[in-house]
Structure formats: structure tokens, C-alpha cells
Amino acid sequence: MHGDLRAQTAAYALLMCRWDTATDVCGLLDGFDDTQAISRIENALDCREVDETRLFYEDSGRDAAVYFYESFLRAYDPERSKKRGVVYTPPEVIGCMVDGVEVILRDSLGVGIEEAKVIDPCCGVGAFLRFIELRERQPHKMVGVELMPAACAIAQTLLKKAEIRQVDWLSEAFDYDTGGPIVILGNPPYSGHSSNAGKIADLMRNYREGIAERNPKWLQDDYVKFIRMAQHHIEKAGRGIVAFITNHSYLFNPTFKGMRSSLAATFDDIRIIDLGGNIKQRGAAEENVFPIQVGVAIAFFVRTGRGGSSIRYANVTGSREEKLRAVESFDVRNGTWSEVSPIEPFHLFIAQDSNLAQEYYGFCSMFEIYLTSVIGFVTSRDKFAIGLSRQEVLDRIGLLRDGDVSDEELREKYGVGDLDIDAARSLLRDDPDWEMRVVEVLYRPFDYRWAYHCPVIMERPRLPLMGLINAEYPAIAVGRAGRVTGSDEWDVVFAADRPTDLNLFRRGGARLFPGYIDNCGQRQSNVKMPCDDPTALTSFIYAILHSGRYRARYAEFLRADYPRIPIPEDQSKLQALAHLGSRLFDVHLMREGVDLGVWEADEKVRIGGYVLPDKYINDRAAAGSDRQIDRLKSLIRESLIIRKQIDDAVAEVGLW
């Protein structure tokens, strides 16, 4: 063993000895002959807090030898813990998954667990396999795969009936003898994006089918790759089960539609227990069973070899304790399942109203309406590139250009990040019009700021189209996935008449659809379909997107992707709403001449996950004058009045 690995393993072994666990860990100390180091560790462990920690795990029904390792690694090597995404699974969840596997093996595959081969591809110190070892019925073979050497060494000591392999599950190095059904279960890492070559890179290609993004980053998450590799091994074996608890984003995020289609084609029985828990969504019901931010779900992917297709979904809500109790008693055979029939184009793995889906997907997508669109700019260094005044930004750029401050100060004080300072300074000095690159931008709803809109400073300025968004060429800004903002109602829409930040909304990104674009100095319609009045159509769309009736009726679909629009053939219906949409455009663009009422103290509005006027007031602090804030409050009141009128008009004209 390397020195650090030996030290980590010895420290954990001595802790287990102190706790007098039933597991023989003395073997972990073999070859570790530094008696002084052992003595220092033993002295450090000789305290009441160490014993109380053991009692805490025992009282909660958890195996201290297994469950303390997550906390131990986080304290011992926080960087490695974060990189590997080490999060240990509550025993209630493990019990639900193992029980579910046994039931499905008997019911669907006609075998007991004794005839199956069980593989945990991310076993850590062996929580899942240790749970199985303590049960009456044992698989004929168990294999644990673990990449971290210390965890692997501990697992080899804790597990008496399992073969532990220190290999990378996602590499081509892992293989095993097939024959009979296999069960692949576990809790893949929550470490986010990683780059892997070899076999997994080839396998991931079919998850990207039908995806417009050139580099869909969410498909780079480790848990997605673990699912894909497990799917591959089940296909090789012919029959088997994958039982994973993972991030639940793949159930509904449009980026994963290729993944969902692939899974539905491979497995003839899919059962999903969605535990939610996304802390970015409001409400106590979103408490997580793990100490992480993303929601999670248990999934059983079953391949019997008989064909067919069945997808069942269950949603578990409540506090963490309520969810764990529900999971512990969940009946995988006769539970409260909703049948899921994946609907084009996204094949969601959540229950949907099929009649309403047919109606909604019959509407026009924004991409069918408009010829071109652009997503918001990204600076990657807002603190440096964006300011409250033009002069503030010019002063910062001047410091960089003139070399009046050191590179270290630029990085530490102004947050320029990985900017190539020498190259940027040279380009700025060679640009006679460098001061002209500072432009007014839409940073957040109602919040105009100044930015250095140029590729020298910005990571992605989105030129030239973004540079053409102005008062003459305003655009509708919408987000793709409404569920990520934390709002109860879909609200990722606003008006833009300036270059606009990608993070206009709290999460999810802003894409701009202008009604007109500039073509060689000429104003040209950006509407793709036959249309006599692009301005009226854009105003109509803006009105619809602010209709509470529309948002409520199609809430489940708006959470997943860019909105679709019910465009009426009757022009009188379109004009009735276009008038209101135009007025709302004027309010949101803070145009002069808008009639404003008097704001009442309790009037607030949520836009893109932000509560206004609170967001504006908090961000501006002392920089926002009372006059500006009072005007914003009046604009909010007027927008609420217009939105009520829009809903009345929608009900009167009848659009669906």
C-alpha cells in the first residue's frame, strides 16, 4: 500500500477495534509496523466522543463499521470524498431495494436469489453486500467493485462471502462469467461530470440520439454512465435486474430522452420509486433522504427476455423520516403504482395525462414559430465584466488594459478566473474602439446593468445575434425547464430589449426569441410560419405565457421543456390577446408612458424563480434609489393587473 492509503486504512481499523465491532479488522494492520503512529492514533481515539459516535449508529440501527466511513472519509480526505461523490445509503433504502430484487426475481424471472449473481459496481465499504450477507438466503456469488483503495481494503475485511475487485466499473477491465440472471444493485456516485474513455464512451452514444445539444453535459454525470454500463451487462447476460438509487433527473429532463428510449427498449419491466428531495424546489415535501441537493429515485430495471413493455411509477413525499418509513414498508409487487405510457417526443418516465399530452404536443413549439433564437451570454467572470454603471466597467477594463494592477490582484480582487490576462491586455490595447464594447444588458428581471460585451472578456458573448437585441428588436426570453426554479407555477418568461444574461432566471438558462432580426441593415421578420403581423403574434405568445390558466393546465409539460403555443386560426382571438401581451411587454421593458397604479405592500410576483421586488432590492442594496424601487413596485402592480385581464380573455375566447 502507498503511505497515505496505509495510514487511512490503519486509522479506520483502529477505530473499529476501539468500537469492538464484530468484524475482525486486525488484518488491516498487517505490515503497518509504525508503533508510535499506532499509539498516537489509539490515544486520540480514547475519548468519550468516539464511544458516543458508535452508540449513535447502533441506536439508529446502522452498522457503524459501514456507515461511519462516509463521515470518516469526508474528514480525512474531503477532496477525495467530494470527487468520488461518496454518499452512503440509509438501511431502509437498502432493505427496500434488496427486498424488491428478491420479489422481482421470483415473480418475473422465476428464480430465487440463490440462483442469481449479485454485483455492486460501486460498493464502497460494502453496505449493500453486507446487508445481503446477513440475510437467510444468499446469492451463489457476490461481487463488489470499488475504485478507492482504502474502501476496497476495508470492504475485503468486512465482507466474508463476497469477492471484492479494485477496478473501474466503467472501464473495459471489468468482466465476469455469465450464466443465469445477474443483479446489479447499488448507489452510484454523486460526483457530477467525469470524462471516461474506452467502452463507456462507445456505449453512451445511443443515449445522445435525438439530442440537439452538441455536448449535453448532464449525460456526463457518473450515475448516467453507471446505469448505461449496467444496462450493457444485463444485455450481455440476457436476463437480470438493475436496482439503483440515483439522481432522479433522468426521469423527466428532456436531455435524457435518448436514455429513456434506450432503457425502455432494453428492459421489459421498469419500476420507479421517486423520492424527490430537490432542495431547490420549495416545500417540506422536498426533504431528501440523503444530505445532497438533487432529488433521488429508486429504479428497478428488469429484463426477462420475454419482451413487452411495462413502466410503473410511484411518488413518495414527506419529510426524510416519513420517506424512509414509506420506503421500508413499500410493496414492490402490490404497491401504489401509476402506469406510465411514454409519450413523444420526450418519453418521460413519470405519469402524465395522455389526453392532455396529445392536446399540448399538438401546439406549435417556439422553434416551429421562430426562424432563429439565441441563448443568453455567459461572462464566467461577472464580478469583473458586469457593473452597475458604464464607468464602473470601463474603470475595471482600464486597469486590465493599462497594466496598473498585478495579475494576482486582478484574480483575487476582481475574480477574472482563468482569463488569459496577457492575451486580453494585448487585444484591448490593439482595439481603438475598446471603450465602445461596454453596453447596457438585462442581467435579471427588471435589473439592467452594464457589461463588457466582447469575446476578449466574456466566455460566450453570443455574437452577432445577441448584439442585435435592442429596443427595436425586442425578444421573448424563456427557460427550458420550469421545474428547476423552485417556483410552484411555471414562470421562466420575460421580455428582453438588450443583450441578456444566461442566468436571467434563477436556474435553467434563458433563450431569446426575437420577433424581428436585422438582415444587412433591413428589419426582417423572424417568424417562420405564414404571418401578416409578427409583432402581434409575438405579443400574443407573450400574453399566453403569462396566463395562469395556461400555466396550470399544462404545468406538467411546461416543467420539462420550452413551451408550446396554441395559436388560433381565428385572428380576432389572436388580436384580443395580442393587445394585452403588448401592454405587458411595455411594462416588463419599463417603457416610458406606461400608466401605473399605486403599489400595495403585499403585492409580489415570481419571475424565473425570483421574488420581486425583493430580489431587485436585495441585489441593489444601497445602489437602488427610492425612486427606482417605487417605479418597480408600480410596474409589478400593473403587470399583475394585466395578467388578470389575460386570464379573463383566455377564458372568453377559448383556446383549448
Image: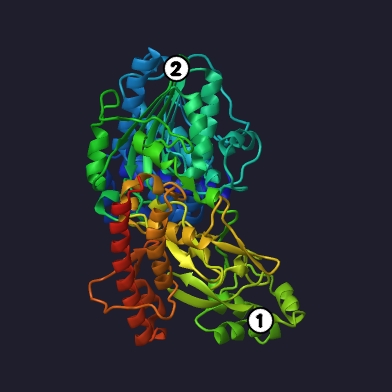
Residue 227 placement, left or right of 612:
right
Q: How far apart are marks 1 and 2 (CA)?
A: 66 Å
Assign a secondary structure to mark 1. helix
Looking at the image, residue 448 lies above or below residue 288: below
Check disc 2: other Cα within 10 Å, few if <14, some if 14-19, many if 20+: many
Residue at position x 46%, y 66% from top?
495
Seen from the viewer's position, the closer of residues 643 and 28 is: 643
Q: Quadrant of residue 348?
A: top left
Helix, strand or loop status at disc 2 = loop
Q: Say which amino acid is labelled 1.
A: Met
Instruction: State the residue at coordinates (36%, 72%).
Output: 615
Q: Mark 1 points at which residue?
A: 436
Q: Residue at x 50, y 55 (%)?
A: 79
Answer left or right for 15 relative to 403. left
- Tell me, yes or no, if residue 414 can be seen here: yes
Q: Is residue 384 left or right of residue 361?
A: right
Measuring from the top left, give residue 80's x and y in whole percent: 51, 51
Vertical relation: 166 (above or below) 247: above
Quadrant assignment for the N terminus? top right
Q: Is residue 145 visible?
A: no
Give me the disc on residue 304.
Answer: 2
Q: Which of 457 and 288 is in front in this view?
A: 457
Q: Label 2 amino acid?
A: Thr
The reply to whether callout 1 and callout 2 are in contact (CB within 8 Å) is: no
Q: Is 254 located above or below residue 260 in the figure?
A: below
